Image: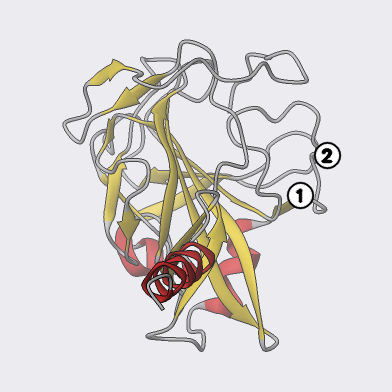
Amino acid sequence: MRRAPFWILLVLVTAGLVAAPTPRTARTRVADGFDQPVGKPDAEGYYMSRGFRANYHMGEDWNGLGGGNTDLGAPVYSVAHGYVVMARDVRMGWGNLVIVRHVYMDGGKLRFVDSVYAHLDRVMVKEGQQVVKGQQVGTIGTNRGMYRAHLHFEIRKNLFIGFNQRGFGRGLDNYYVPGAFIAPRRKLPGSGRSGVVPIGTFNLPPGSLRVEESGKPVPRESAAPRPSATPFKVERF
């Protein structure tokens, strides 16, 4: 009889471990719809200066109607509820890069996409942070003067791409045309629900910097990532 408390405790601990979420997943709110990343919710005051082109330009570029750098520092918003899987200065052609992972209902099933916000002047979220639709994630930038100020925006089917597009097909098997994805999904079922999304699906580049909410880059605290299977390539977006 004296051993009974030990076995009861063991069962309780085991049950707790089984029920605990794994470190490679995270729970986030199910997206109840998707809006535009600028001029929320309908891109008011902005125009698309460059569209999606398979094998060449895997997203859409948004510019303010004033042209030039008149939109420098303008707000960039998360297009839907989600979980921040990257918020870093990865330099190359990206600069400050934010990637938000979303779970949404489609045809009665939960599906996943990543929304990508590149060339930001400031990053205003942190990795591992929950965000809601319309929450500001950063500001429009130039990637240190590499471009005229604009937002490069992508919607990805493939959750493994991250910052390095090498080794992934540059077509509709891995990407959505952002505008074509958002238009029929402005309102979705699932409001108030939560879902589990996979995380840790891509490696961080060597020497990358974490970015504080102030937009100031700070040295990474984590160990160096595993080497990528494919070499980096500096690309202009």
Residue indicated by mark 2: 169
Q: Residue furthest front?
A: 1
Residue indicated by mark 1: 174
Is 178 left or right of 127, judged from the image as shown? Answer: right
Q: Residue furthest left?
A: 214
x and y percent of residue 119 in the render? 42, 30
Is 180 left or right of 211, judged from the image as shown? Answer: right
> What residue do we see at 37% from left, 41% from top?
127
Contact, mark 2 vs mark 1 (Cβ under 8 Å):
yes
In the image, residue 12 above or below residue 101: below
> What residue do we see at 58% from left, 30% from top?
163
Q: CA distance from mark 2 to mark 1?
A: 6 Å
x and y percent of residue 176 in the render? 69, 57
> What residue do we see at 23% from left, 30% from top?
212
Count of picture labels: 2
Secondary structure beneath dot 1 equals: loop
x and y percent of residue 140 in the render? 32, 37
x and y percent of residue 227 in the render? 67, 16
Residue 98 is tagged as none
Binning the other alpha carbons within 10 Å of mark 1 as few (below 14), some (14 to 19) or many (20 upward) gives some
Find residue 198 and report its image quarter. Answer: bottom right
Find residue 149 and report its image quarter. Answer: top left
Give amino acid for label 2: Gly
Q: Quadrant of the C terminus?
A: top right
Please, which colouring scheme is shown?
Answer: secondary structure
Comparing 2 with 162, the one in front is: 2
Is 86 left or right of 141, judged from the image as shown? Answer: right
Secondary structure beneath dot 2 equals: loop
> What residue do we see at 59% from left, 21% from top?
236
Say whether disc 2 or disc 1 marks the residue closer to the N-terminus: 2
